[in-house]
Structure formats: C-alpha cells, structure tokens
Image: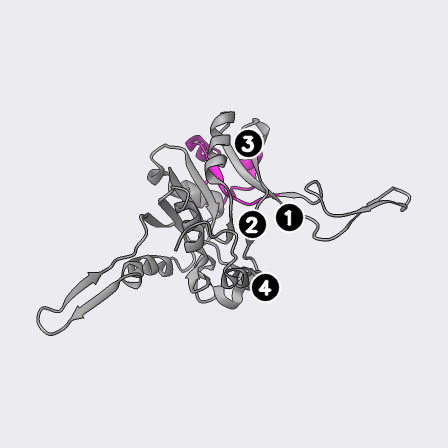
C-alpha cells in the first residue's frame, strides 16, 4: 500500500528554519523529520511513498538524490577512469516518488494532483511535520473492518495538569487528574483512504480538511481511529526543540525501528 505524505506547505510558524527549506526537511537529530515519519511507516512494512512537494520542492528531490551516497561508503577514483565505487550501501528499502504539486496548492489539491500515481488503489496519507508511534497495522485493520471510505487518526491533545469539574454557578464539583475524556480529539493525519475520496476534492484551492471531509461526514463515510500513544507536531521552534530533545535522549517514542 502506498503512503502519501503532504510536504508542500510554507511552514510559516517555524520560519526560523523554513525560510531555508521545506518544513518536512527540518532536521531532528541530523535527519529531516520527513525521514523519521518514513522510518515509522517502513518499520511496519510500508515502503512505497509519494511525497506531495511544493515550497522549495527541489530541496526534497536533491536530498533523496544524494541519500544513497550519504548512507554508503564511497570511493572516488580520479586516477584513471574517474569512477565511483559504492561500498557497504545502507539505504532503505524504499520507493519514493516526489511530485511538485504546486506552490500555493491546498492540501486537497495536492492530494488530487498525485491521483495518477495511486493507481486507483486504497492508500495511506499523513502530514510531513509530525511524529508518532501509531500502530499502522491496527489502523489498516480497523479501516477494512468498517467498510467506509476514509479513516483518520485522532489524538487527545487536551489538559496536561489537574482538571476542575465546575458547576454553572461556579462551584467546584471535583478536582482530579487528567483523564482520556478531557480535551479535544484532534485529527493527527495517519489516514487510510479509498481512491473515491479524491472525487470529493474539486481542485487546487480546496483544503482536504474542509469541504471534502465535511462531505464525507455528511454521507457517513468518515471514521476515526483513536491513538493513545505518543504524537507531536512540529509547528513551532519550541516544538521542534522538544522533539529533538527526546531524540537525543535515546528515548524517542516514535523510534520503533532498529538501527
């Protein structure tokens, strides 16, 4: 099953780094967060990727073009035939298609632009700026079980501290620790979609999260898969630093692969 990753936005909220590169190419522990996302999928058996690029899309293409050399030992022989010999290659078992989906295209439009690469088959979709330890096989199993057109993963990104239950008159009914029922469940990507979902997208100016999702909801074709593990987006420099600190500590929850 192919995995589509949305990687074309401007990343304006983390402009300290995104003015030089697309947000998915901002590094966590010397590797782009895009690499971390792909490693999470690959560790669970998903190795074919379609990258929806846009802003500074050449940076993504050049990184993958050089990845083979960067992860292998290389001999450059300038003495005779100017040959290059690759030793001990350590690349991933990936097939990666990087598609320029336009500079100002919205998320729905980007997805629709890669339709020809999806071959009218079900596919996975996620965002190129967040990491998590989502159980992708359970997600796929759930999607197949309900028979609807779309499944998105949701996460409780709510309260971090004690919670007050308050009556309308202002009296405190209870003070307790945070539970899974507190806070809002948000869309964190890690979706499974049937190919007909693309018919709900009208063009480049359409955000996937607006009209297409609303249409799916109206028809009863959108389901949610609740993720209760770790998830973190990288919208700001502070969030980037939080993710990197976890990685550098050797305790990154999303690192489910062996070195």
Check whether the beta carbons of the residues at disc 3 and disc 4 lie within 8 A of each other.
Answer: no
Of the numbered discs 2 and 3, the one sitting upstream in the chain is 3
Residue behind mark 3: 222
**Who's the residue at 8% across and 71% down the image?**
80
- Marks 3 and 1, Cα distance to the nearest angstrom? 20 Å
- Marks 4 and 1, Cα distance to the nearest angstrom? 17 Å
Question: Residue 232's spot in the image, x, y percent?
Answer: 56, 53
Q: Is residue 68 left or right of residue 111?
A: left
Of the numbered discs 2 and 4, the one sitting upstream in the chain is 2
Q: Is residue 44 left or right of residue 132?
A: left
**Who's the residue at 57% across and 60% down the image?**
239
Q: Is residue 254 above or below residue 245?
A: above
Residue range (magenta)? 186-214
Check whether the beta carbons of the residues at disc 1 and disc 2 lie within 8 A of each other.
Answer: yes
Of the numbered discs 4 and 1, the one sitting upstream in the chain is 1
Placement of the C terminus among the 4 image quadrants: bottom left
**Residue 1 visible from this viewpoint:** yes
Placement of the N terminus among the 4 image quadrants: top left
Residue behind mark 1: 157
Of the numbered discs 3 and 4, the one sitting upstream in the chain is 3
Q: Does the magenta segment cover residue 210?
A: yes
């Amino acid at each position: 099953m192919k995995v589509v990753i949305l990687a074309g936005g401007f990343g304006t909220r983390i402009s300290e780094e995104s003015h030089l590169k697309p947000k998915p190419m901002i590094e966590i522990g010397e590797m782009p967060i895009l690499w971390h996302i792909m490693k999470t999928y690959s560790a669970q058996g998903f190795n074919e990727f379609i990258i929806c690029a846009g802003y500074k899309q050449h940076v993504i293409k050049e990184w993958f073009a050089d990845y083979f050399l960067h992860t292998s030992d290389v001999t450059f022989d300038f003495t005779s035939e100017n040959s290059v010999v690759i030793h001990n290659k350590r690349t991933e078992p990936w097939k990666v298609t990087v598609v320029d989906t336009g500079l100002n295209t919205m998320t729905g439009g980007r997805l629709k632009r890669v339709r020809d690469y999806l071959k009218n088959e079900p596919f996975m979709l996620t965002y190129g700026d967040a990491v998590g330890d989502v159980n992708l096989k359970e997600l796929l199993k759930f999607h197949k079980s309900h028979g609807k057109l779309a499944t998105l993963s949701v996460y409780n990104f709510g309260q971090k501290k004690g919670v007050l239950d308050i009556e309308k008159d202002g009296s405190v009914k209870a003070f307790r620790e945070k539970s899974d029922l507190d806070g809002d469940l948000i869309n964190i990507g890690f979706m499974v979609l049937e190919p007909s979902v693309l018919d709900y997208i009208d063009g480049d100016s359409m955000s996937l999260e607006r009209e297409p999702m609303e249409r799916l909801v109206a028809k009863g074709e959108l389901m949610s898969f609740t993720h209760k593990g770790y998830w973190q987006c990288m919208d700001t420099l502070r969030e980037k630093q939080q993710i990197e600190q976890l990685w550098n500590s050797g305790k990154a929850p999303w690192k489910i692969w062996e070195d």
